[in-house]
Image (cartoon, rainbow, N blue to C red):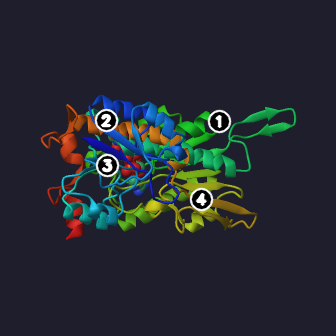
Amino acid sequence: MKVGIGRERRDGEKRVAATPETVTQLIGLGVDVTVEAGAGLASGYSDAAYQKAGAQIAPDFDATAFDVLCHVRPLSPELAATLPTGVITVGLASPASELPTVAALAAAKVTSFALELVPRISRAQSMDALTSQALVAGYRAVLEATIRFPRFFPLYMTAAGTIPPARVLVLGAGVAGLQAIGTAKRLGARVSAYDVRPASADEVTSMGGTFITLDLAAVEGAGGYASELAEDRAVRQRELLAPHVAKADVLITTAAIPGRPAPLLVTRQMVAAMPAGSVVIDLAAETGGNVEGVQPGVDQLVPTTAGDGFVTLVGMQDAASAMASDASRLYAKNVANLLALMTNDGQVVPDFTDEVIAGACLTADGVVRHAPTAAALE
Ligand code: NAD
C-alpha cells in the first residue's frame, strides 16, 4: 500500500508527520512511503535523509494519490472532499473545531483517524500525540517566559549581592503543566502549582513543585479529565487563586477541558496585580485562553495596578511547532505506531474490534463514529 506524507500547509506549522526514522519503520511494515519534497525541511529533516531511509521524494505531491495519508494539522475541507473513497487518513483532526473537514471526510467515505481520540490507556501510550505534543509545549512555555522575564530564574549569591529565585506558578497540572513545573524547577525557580484534580498533587510534588490546595470541592470527570466548573464555582476559584497569582513572577496556564473552550482562571485585574516585569504565558490561548483578553500569537503589555510598570501577557501559539524537530520526532512515532497496529503484511486494515483503533476512528463508511462530533454536526 502507498503511504503519503505531505508538507503541512497551515501558516506557522513546521512539524511533519514522518521522520527518516519512522520512514524506516513504515517500510519495515511492508508499505511504500512517498514524502513531498521539502516536507521535513522546517523540522530539520532533508529530502536526502528521507530518501536514504527508503522514501520516494515527490516534487509534485498529489495528496489524493495514496491509500494512507498522514498529516499533522487537520486537513482542509477542500482536500478532504477530494480524497477517494476508502482512503485512510491519520493525524490531528481537532474534531470539535474543524466540523467542515469532518463532514467532508464522512461524505467522501474516508476512514479517518484523529490522534486526539486515541484512548489514554497504557497500551496506547506510544500513539498518544496529545501527551507527546503537550510535553513539548510545557517545556517551551517556560523557555518563552525566561526570554521575556527581565530577571534570573535561580537564586544567585554573589559578591555584588543576592538575587532571589523567581516564583513560578503553574495553573493546570496535566502533561504540559507537569513539564512546565519540571523545566522551571531545573532552571532554579521556586515553583508552585494548582489543578482542580486533587490526584495531580502527588505528580506536582514529584516534579519538585508545591501543590496549592484551594477551599473548593474537587472536580474530576470521566477518564481522569477535569470537567467544567459551574459559573459560581469558577468565580470562587478565581477569587481563591488571586493572592497566589499576585505573588507570582511568572505564571504559566495550561488548563483545558476536552472538547470545550479553555476555562477562564485569571482575570485582567489579577494580571495587573502581579509585580512589574512579570510574565504570563497562556498555553490555552488557541482554545479561548485561561487568561482574560489573551490573544493567540500576541504579546500584550498590561499596566500594573500599582502603576510601576507592565506585565507581559503572552498568548502562546504553535508551541509544539516552535520545537519542530523533536516535536516531529515524537509525533511521527505516534503516527507510525498507530499505523503499525493496523498493518499486516503491507496492508493497512483497521480492526475495529481493537479499542484503540475503534476509539481513534473519527469517520468510516460515510459515518462520523465519534459520538460528540456526530452530535455537533446534527
Ligand atoms: P488537559 O490538557 O485536558 O488539561 C490540562 C489540565 O488542566 C488538567 O490537568 C486538568 O485537570 C486541568 N484543569 C481543567 N480545568 C481546570 C480548572 N478549572 N482549574 C485548574 N485546572 C484545570 O489534560 P492532559 O494533560 O491531557 O491530562 C489529563 C489527564 O489524563 C490527566 O489525569 C493525565 O494524568 C491523564 N493522562 C493519562 C495518560 C495515559 O494513561 N496514557 C496519558 C496522558 C494523560
Query: In terms of image quadrants, where is residue 166?
Result: top right
The mark lying in front, picked from 2 and 4, is 2
N-term-proximal mark, 3 vs 1: 3
Q: Amino acid at mark 4?
A: Val
Question: CB under 8 Å between callouts 3 and 1?
Answer: no
- Is ligand 1 closer than 8 angstroms to the Cβ of mark 4? no
N-term-proximal mark, 2 vs 4: 4
Q: Amino acid at mark 2?
A: Asn
Question: CB under 8 Å between callouts 2 and 4?
Answer: no
Tag 3's secondary structure?
A: strand
Q: Residue at point 52% right, 67% down?
A: 292
What residue is disc 4 on?
Answer: 314
The mark lying in front, picked from 3 and 1, is 3
N-term-proximal mark, 4 vs 3: 3
N-term-proximal mark, 3 vs 2: 3
Tag 2's secondary structure?
A: helix
Drawn side of residue 54 relative to residue 107, left or right:
right
Drawn side of residue 259 relative to residue 60, left or right:
left
Question: CB under 8 Å between callouts 4 and 1?
Answer: no
Indicate the position of residue 237 as horizontal and vertical percent values: 45, 59
Q: Amino acid at mark 3?
A: Leu
What residue is disc 1 on?
Answer: 188
Q: CA distance from mark 2 to mark 4?
A: 34 Å
- Which mark identifies residue 337? 2
Indicate the position of residue 36 as horizontal and vertical percent values: 43, 48
Residue 62 can be seen, yes or no: yes
Question: CB under 8 Å between callouts 3 and 2?
Answer: no
- Is ligand 1 closer than 8 angstroms to the Cβ of mark 1? no
The mark lying in front, picked from 1 and 2, is 2
Q: CA distance from mark 4 to mark 3?
A: 34 Å
Question: Are there few (<14), some (14-19), or many (20+) residues within 10 Å of tag 4?
Answer: many
What residue is disc 3 on?
Answer: 69
